[in-house]
Amino acid sequence: MATLREIRDRITSVTSTQQITKAMKMVAAAKLRRAQENILAFRPYSYELRNLIGHLVATASDLTGIPLLEKRPVEKVLLVVVTSDRGLCGAFNGNIIRRTVQRVAEYKDREVSLFVIGRKSAEFFSKRDYTIQGEKINLFNHLKFEDAVDISSQLVSLYLNGAFDRIEFVYNEFKSAIQQNLQVEQFLPFVSEEGSDDTRAQVDFIYEPGKIEILNTLIPKHLNVQVWRILLESNAAEQGARMTAMESATDNAQEMIDRLTVHYNRSRQAAITTEISEIVSGAEALKEN
Amino acid sequence: MASELNLEIVTPFGKLLDSNIKSCTVPGTQGEFQVLQNHAALISTVEIGSVKVEYTDAKSAYIAVSGGFCEVKDNRVTIMVESAEMADQIDAKRAEAAKKRAEERLSSKRADIDYNRAKLALVRATNRLKIAGRP
């Protein structure tokens, strides 16, 4: 049985761990709030762009002049894997990595390369037998729109020069603070969602320059926005996952402290009882003499 | 039909502006154009430049925008750009630094530099500086 002192030391150690996990939880909660604000601020822009694209694609008579819409036979695939830079966020990164490995296996007849975002996936895949096309780490701490533009333009040029015929994103979508949805999403060739509420259909627009030219500038812009959205979602999901993970770590620590305290008190009591009975029996022995 | 002209400027970081105006001048790809009330429906690409807004109370303002789109329909103007700043909100120091950085990149002639990107950064920074000086 552990001595009193050992138990006491253990309690102290668990308490300080608990303080750390509690602090991490708070930090994650604050970051999550900021990430959510970002997502909210960005929604109108993304909504307007998507509608506009939907309208143009639906009304344009001829879409052949737009290379980013053009579908080619798929031979070379690029998977863009979005994980976090830091750990301690539960199954967040593990899920992504597992799904990616599975996705690569699904494409077994084709050539698959990876583009890794976030240190966790970079570390995992660089140690294993995967072709890494590009890498982007340390960006979630100060997430900037320029980062998204940078990634997106790299991907677009890879697609346009024929290095890849299909580009997909694997990332965690932010559902709520306690829930993330794993998503595999096609990035290129570009798929436009048909504008369901197309209020523009009846209007006779002047297009300046032409529809095709507008689409050719609009689609890359929209792709920037897509990457930005994915980064924001992933960031929010990461903070959510970390918050939940740290919360249960704090709870577990508390449980452990409670158990150890009971244990400590029992041992202390037992020690006192033994001591008393020793003294009493010692006194008894003296009396008999 | 609405009797006023409404201008909305949206960026990935939120709405910069949503108000009733008298007119606005937008730097389109095929030249600058002005939108007044009852303008015909129009979709145009927008270049890096300045949007001039005349408010209903005869005040006017300049807004630095980077590339994007403009849509005019039913007296609603929606400008979607990747960044937009009111003239008095422009961080001139930052723009100056960005300009210098871009110029250095362009003059260094190193192979690993994305020439187009540096050039665009330069245009954006110069545009900001130009507009920052205006009232």
Image (cartoon, rainbow, N blue to C red):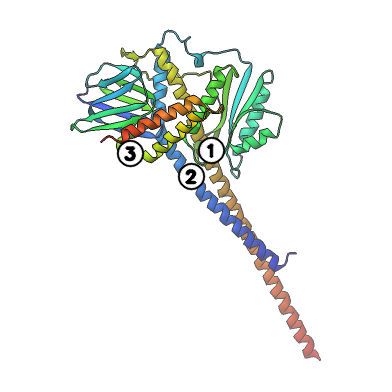
Q: Secondary structure at mark 1?
A: loop
Residue, disc 2:
A31
Q: Describe residue B47's horizontal placement relative to residue A96 as left or right.
A: left
- Quarter holding residue A40: top left
Instruction: Decide which of A81, A176 is in the foreground and name it.
Output: A81
Instruction: Decide which of A149, B130 is in the foreground and name it.
Output: B130
CB under 8 Å between discs 2 and 1? no
Residue, disc 3:
B89
Label 2 sits on what residue type?
A: Lys
Q: Secondary structure at mark 2?
A: helix
| Residue at image coords 56%, 19% | A159
Label 3 sits on what residue type?
A: Gln
Instruction: Decide which of A74, B59 is in the foreground and name it.
Output: B59
The label nearer to you, 2 versus 3, is 3
Residue, disc 1:
A139
Q: Residues within 10 Å of mark 3 (few under 14, many from 20)?
A: few
* x and y, in percent, of residue A251 in the image: 58, 52
Q: Is residue A27 visible?
A: yes
Label 1 sits on what residue type?
A: Leu
The label nearer to you, 2 versus 1, is 1
Image quadrant in which the C terminus of chain A is located: bottom right
The label nearer to you, 3 versus 1, is 3
* x and y, in percent, of residue B88 in the image: 30, 38
Q: Describe residue A110's horizontal placement relative to residue B110 as left or right.
A: right
